[in-house]
Amino acid sequence: MQKQIIYFWSRAAFASSEDGNAPTVSGAIDIVLQLSSEFSATNSLPGHPYESGVYELAYTVEPVNVEASSEPLPVLKLIEMDKLPNQWTTTLPDLGVVEVDEILRHVYRQQFTYDGRIYRSVFTYEERTLYYTVTNSLRGEPNPDGAWDTAQILPDGTPRFPNGVYLIKVYATDFYGGKIELEHTVTVEN
């Protein structure tokens, strides 16, 4: 696995794991990840090595210096690539091209701007640069409403994520058995 860069998104990208500091987050946050895996053929096929996407992608959030009652989020899976896009959701019937395209936009961030630079997902034979919106998952299915809601309130009126420091963990595997776990701290301040 390579190119492990995490971007934090709230209406616009506002921080990156390459910045070196823990960003302050509030409200609904998307975690956008640039990640790829390199495949090298055992023979000398033209076009190799090339970058490939991931097989499985998931994230979790763990409290670092927050009161003990804060429990980590369970590991929330975005996708498993052993299915076609129209099989990623179990709540919809067979999907057409337009609906599949809409679901793909929940998984891959098409384009965004960070620090004055434009980033785009590209998937062609010559170039594969993919930005995954890891948090666009709801109950195990791609969904644009699945952002990490740092301001979530529990039924008893207490915050689900009290102000403090949290560790974001992103897990990814590729088709070849390679695994990676990325970590970055953030400060929740609602």
Image: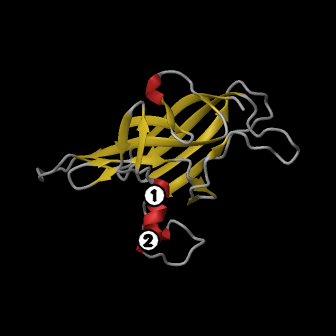
Q: Position of residue 87 (x, y in %)?
A: 49, 70
Where is residue 175? Give x, y as percent: 37, 53
- Closer to the N terminus: mark 2 or mark 1? 2
Please give the label number shown on residue 105: 1
Q: Residue at x 42, y 43 (%)?
A: 112
Residue 73 in sight in this render: yes
Residue 149 appears at what percent x and percent y?
67, 44
Q: Quadrant of the N terminus?
A: top left
Mark 2 packing: few (<14 Cα in 10 Å), some, or many (20+)?
Answer: few
Say which quarter of the image contains residue 29: top right
Q: Secondary structure at mark 2?
A: helix
Compared across the picture, whether 3 is left or right of 20 comes to left
Q: How is the image coloured?
A: secondary structure
Give the number of callouts. 2
- Mark 2–mark 1 Cα distance, whole angstroms, equals 11 Å
Provide the residue designation for mark 2: 98
Tell me if mark 1 has few (under 14), some (14-19) or many (20+) residues whose alpha carbon lies within 10 angstroms of its own.
some
Numbered badge on residue 75:
none
Instruction: Please identify the residue farthest to the front as the structure is shown.
Output: 116
Q: Residue 90, relative to residue 5: is it above or below?
A: below
Residue drawn at the location 58% of the way across and 54% of the way down: 137
The residue sitting at the right extreme is 156
Regarding residue 2, the answer to whether it shows in the image is: no
Q: Amino acid at mark 2?
A: Val
Q: Is residue 126 left or right of residue 81?
A: left
Say what secondary structure mark 1 lies in.
Answer: helix
Judged from this view, the residue extending furthest toward the top is: 21
What amino acid is found at the position of numbered circle 1 in the picture? Arg
Q: Position of residue 59 (x, y in %)?
A: 56, 44
Instruction: Report the quarter where the C terminus lies.
Output: top right
